[in-house]
Image (cartoon, rainbow, N blue to C red):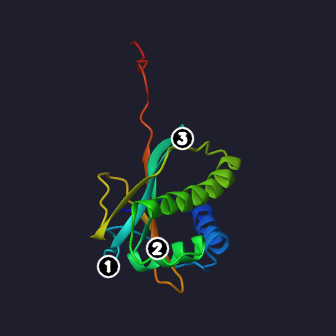
């Protein structure tokens, strides 16, 4: 399947991630090569905690998620909060949601200035061991991996064209 992508749409998410982790967690996050999930030779990435946010606009809906392996996330929270955390907890889930809110806030500002009119919802956080994600969509999911001194983590962005709402006018013959 051939896919057309507007790379300018993803750049604010990459920049927002790098800036957010630098400011909030004193961590340099370096973007790696993005790819389409299931359409590359990249191995399936696993994670222990993820924040997921629904995105809506007049032309599409979708999700953005930021997914962390446990050691990476704990390291980020240790730096962000100045504490020593050794395990995932309900209290730390707020940290995952807050980082995603800040990342999305940056991207939303840039993209709305370009006419995208993005809206967001409250993030949902999931946690477990060695989790993977699967999007039930014909639209490919783009994976934006990052490296840091704490390890690798990634964003996933999946968008779906917005379906017309309400009655559809038909031309009479």
The residue drawn where x is 66% and y is 47% is: 112
Could you tell me how far apart the alpha carbons at marks 2 and 3 are, in whole angstroms? 30 Å
Q: Along the horizontal axis of the image, is 160 left or right of 82?
A: left
Percent position (x, y) of residue 130? Answer: 28, 73
133 relative position to 57: left or right? left
Quadrant of the image occupied by residue 21: bottom right
Label 1 neighbour load within 10 Å: few <14, some 14-19, many 20+: few
Of circles 2 and 1, which is in front? 2
In the rendered view, tell whether residue 39 sits above or below residue 122. below
Residue at mark 2? 73
Q: Which residue is mark 1?
A: 43
Q: Is residue 110 left or right of residue 135?
A: right
Going from N to C along the chain, the mark reached first, 2 or 3, is 3
The quarter holding residue 40 reads bottom left
Estimate the spatial distance between the alpha carbons at disc 2 and disc 1, rounded to whole Å.
20 Å
Name which of mark 3 and mark 1 comes first in the sequence: 1
> Which residue does the image show at 46% across and 76% down from the upper left?
85
Of 101 and 80, which appears nearest the observer? 80
Q: Residue furthest top?
A: 172
Q: Which residue is mark 3?
A: 57
Residue furthest to the front: 83
Q: Which image quadrant is residue 170 in?
A: top left
Label 2 or label 1, whichever comes before in sequence order:
1
Tag 2 near tag 1, CB within 8 Å: no
Mark 3 and mark 2 in contact (Cβ < 8 Å)?
no
SS label for mark 3: loop
Residue ID at (52%, 40%): 59
The answer, for residue 92, to whether it is visible in the render is yes
Q: Position of residue 97 (x, y in %)?
A: 50, 57
At label 3, counting other C-alpha atoms closer than 10 Å, the crowd grade (few under 14, some 14-19, many 20 or more) is some
């Amino acid at each position: 399947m051939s896919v057309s992508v507007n790379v300018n749409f993803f750049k604010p998410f990459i920049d927002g991630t790098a800036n957010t982790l630098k400011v909030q967690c004193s961590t340099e996050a370096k973007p790696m090569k993005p790819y389409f999930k299931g359409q590359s030779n990249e191995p399936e990435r696993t994670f222990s905690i993820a924040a997921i946010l629904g995105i809506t606009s007049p032309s599409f809906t979708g999700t953005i998620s930021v997914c962390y392996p446990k050691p990476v996330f704990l390291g980020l929270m240790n730096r962000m909060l100045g504490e020593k955390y050794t395990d995932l907890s309900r209290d730390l889930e707020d940290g995952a949601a807050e980082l995603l809110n800040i990342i999305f806030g940056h991207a939303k500002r840039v993209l709305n200035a370009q006419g995208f009119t993005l809206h967001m919802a409250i993030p949902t956080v999931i946690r477990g061991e060695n989790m993977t994600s699967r999007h039930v969509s014909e639209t490919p999911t783009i994976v934006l991996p990052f490296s840091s001194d704490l390890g690798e983590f990634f964003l996933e962005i999946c968008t779906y064209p917005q379906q017309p709402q309400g009655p559809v006018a038909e031309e009479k013959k």
